[in-house]
Amino acid sequence: MKPTLIVCGLALGLAGPALADSDTLPALPVLDIAPDRVSVVGVSSGGYMATQLAVAFPETFRGLGVFAAGPWGCAQGSLRLALGQCMGQRHGMPELSELDSRLAAFRDQERLGPTDALARQRVFVWHGEEDEVVDPALGELLATQYRQWLETPEQLSFVMAEDVGHGWPVGGTGLAHITELADCRLGGSPHLLACDRDAAGEALTWLYDDLTPPEDDARGTLLAFDQGEFYRGSGLAEQGQLYLPKACEEGAPCGLVVALHGCNMNQAQVEDAFVRHTGLNAWADANDLAVLYPQTDTSMANPQGCWDWWGFDESSWEPAAGHETRDGHQVQALHAMVNRLSGADAEQEDAPSR
């Protein structure tokens, strides 16, 4: 069976203006989330982070979608490798054997999820052939890495797209509402590419069983929520966004989509472009999927507002630092958001002590 939930998404525009004071932001609500319908999707640095989440908590994330990113653990905690080996090839290509050793060491320390849960995931990997930000060979390497972990090759779909650059291709329902798109081949801000190709639909139909194609634009509700209760470090913005189809808002059982933007794509940098115009919300409406849009912040260590896939938010002196493990600050925060939406944190609080 394919998992029926994914992490990526877009919002509609029914919400009011962004709230500046975090004290006025509502808490993330509890929904009726089906555990077997949760997946994560991301683009660029969000793609790297999506893989970190999927490997750290494979029992939570049943599906993974990655656009324009390379293999798990690629940077190994080094900005030098992140820039010279995980985007271009100035320092050569990553060695999967080294990354496998890193994975095994973290797993021995019980800082990653179980092997059998990882092996059952459904995975979608997309890369543009003309990507000049993250070398397309790195997307191929991620696909190779995951093939070694999955039970069967049929669980993975790898797309190398001709004449497509770095970003998220947009078409169909997503294309109709965007006034400014980046060139499909050249890319650039807002990193939504005018390829007239519904990449959101391609990803979702791979990661879900029997999806219904959207007939209308997204008509759900976009809600701001307080991210500060999950983590007040340097990496996350004060508020994130949650897209709720009407059925989910009214309490019906729903899937959950966690959508992670890339560098220079948070709301402070491109406003609502990513949360409104990827094309994912219309698919979410048609198939009862809530969409979570966490948001990064910029800082001296992270001026482009990237997700932490090389360790900028981990202190070098910490004896057990590991941004790509269950102990990673941002990994923990994102997983806690999913637990809140699914009610898992409340169940843990109510559990009897031993």
Image (cartoon, rainbow, N blue to C red):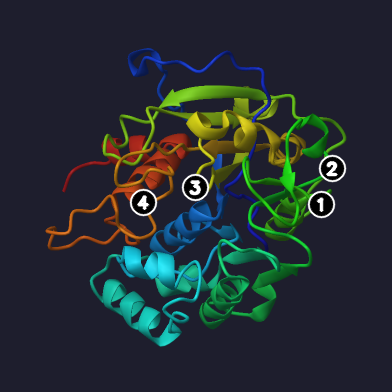
Tell me the quarter of the image containing the N terminus.
bottom right
Classify 330 as above or below 152: above
Q: Earlier in the sequence, mark 1 or mark 2?
A: 2
Give the residue at mark 4: 331
Q: Secondary structure at mark 3?
A: loop
Check disc 1: other Cα within 10 Å, few if <14, some if 14-19, many if 20+: some
Give amino acid for label 1. Answer: Arg
| Amino acid marked by disc 4 | Val
Q: Position of residue 56 (x, y in %)?
A: 39, 61
Between circles 3 and 1, the one closer to the viewer is 3
In this view, the residue in front, 252 or 97, is 97
Element assignment for label 1: loop
Q: Which residue is mark 3?
A: 263
Say whether disc 4 or disc 1 marks the residue closer to the N-terminus.
1
**Foreground tag (3 vs 2):** 3
Marks 4, 1: nearer the viewer: 1
Front-most of residues 21 and 131: 131
Which residue is identified by label 1? 197
Is 228 placed above or below 181 here?
above
Front residue of this view, candidates 164 and 341: 164
In whole angstroms, how far apart are the C-alphas of marks 4 and 2?
32 Å
Q: Label 2 crowding class (10 Å Cα cut-off): few <14, some 14-19, many 20+?
A: some
Instruction: Identify the image quadrant of residue 238.
Output: top left
Asked if the residue at tag 2 contacts the one at tag 1, i.e. Cβ–Cβ closer than 8 Å, the answer is: no
**Residue that appears at 80% across and 38% down:** 175
Q: Secondary structure at mark 2?
A: loop
Q: Are marks 4 and 1 in contact (CB under 8 Å)?
A: no
In the rendered structure, which disc, 3 or 2, sits on the residue that comes first in sequence? 2
Between discs 4 and 3, the one toward the N terminus: 3
Q: Earlier in the sequence, mark 4 or mark 2?
A: 2
The span from disc 3 to disc 1 (Cα, nearest Å) is 22 Å
